[in-house]
Image (tube, rainbow, N blue to C red):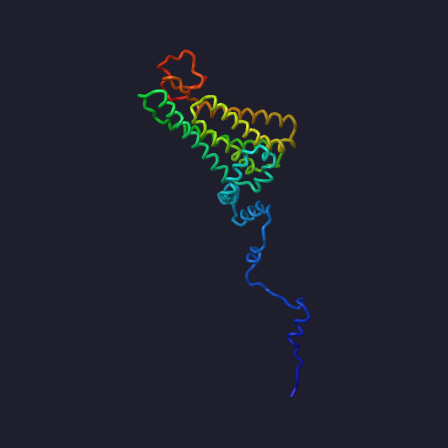
Amino acid sequence: MAYVQVESDEQRLEEGPDGLQFKSFLGADASASNVPRSAGAGNADRQENQRKGGGTFWNVEYYQPYFDVDTQTVLQRCYTTLIPTEARTYISTHLNPPDLYGPFWTLTTLAFALFLSSSLAASITKYLSTEDAVYDYDFHLLSIAATMVYAYGLALPVLFWLALRYIGVGEWSVVEAISVWGYGQFVWIPVAILCVIPVPIVRWVLVGVAFGLSGWFLGANIYPILASAEAKATRLLIILLAAIHLGIAISFKVLFFSYYIMGKKTGGDLPLPGDDAGAGNTTVPRWT
């Protein structure tokens, strides 16, 4: 009868965990899901999702990660644009990573707010100015509002990004440009609602406040990008953007909030010279 020496399990365990090997049959994805994410992992996750989905610049799947944002984050990014002291650090602190969901709904809400507030202001002014006139809503203003808002909030940042690429400044992405411009127009939404007040001086003050806040916000986020460009190109772009920004503010005021009450007359804040008393009985805004 032969005896074979067998090592005891307790003896092998006493040797330490080096002799033990564990193998996971769940795959790499399950183990990675338990690893906590860092705060700045948003851009890496989006790039990984784009690579997995096989999306390219011309496919919808490529932009899908930029719409993956919760409502609380979007509202916080909107409200922060109203605080001038947060403008300089907005991109690094509040817009990391950038998204397209918030800017899209901000611009869409602004377009409807301009139309609805303008229509309500015109109807109130018509009611206070005349008693027998019937007011008809001008739905053509909605198309004008949508065209102006989307052109300024979407087309302009894309053109600005292309201009930066042309002069050799590549620190900004097109998504960041659209995101900054879109969120920067949030201040116009409450201003459009408050411009229902039938007092011309109040409307001008509100438009001036919106012009200043949005201009400061855009300037604080754009100027650090332009600082690395040539001085001549920087001055040209700053002057051009400032002129467009001023033009959009005046256009909002003139096209949508140029109604005032003056006895039996409803018209623009600055009536045209030579108008008779009966020619002012209209809700169509007039300007000089």
Q: Is residue 72 above or below residue 138?
A: below
The vertical placement of 236 against 73, above or below, is above
**Hey, which residue is sitting farthest right in the picture?**
15
Q: How many marks?
A: 0
Please state the horizontal and vertical placement of residue 134, each as a whole percent of the image: 32, 23
Image quarter where the N terminus lies is bottom right
Tell me which residue sits at (65%, 74%) in the image: 10
Direction top: furthest residue: 274
Q: Position of residue 79 (x, y in %)?
A: 52, 36
Name the one closer to the observer, 59 or 87: 87
Q: Which residue extends farthest bottom?
A: 1
Q: Residue at x 64, y 31 (%)?
A: 227
**Residue 191 x/y as whole percent:** 48, 29
Q: Identify the residue at the far left of this view.
A: 132
**Where residue 202 sits: x, y (%)?**
47, 24
Left or right of 2 in this view: 119: left
Occupied quadrant, residue 82: top right
Q: Nearer the viewer, residue 268 or 177?
A: 268
**In the displayed structure, does residue 130 sit left or right of residue 107?**
left
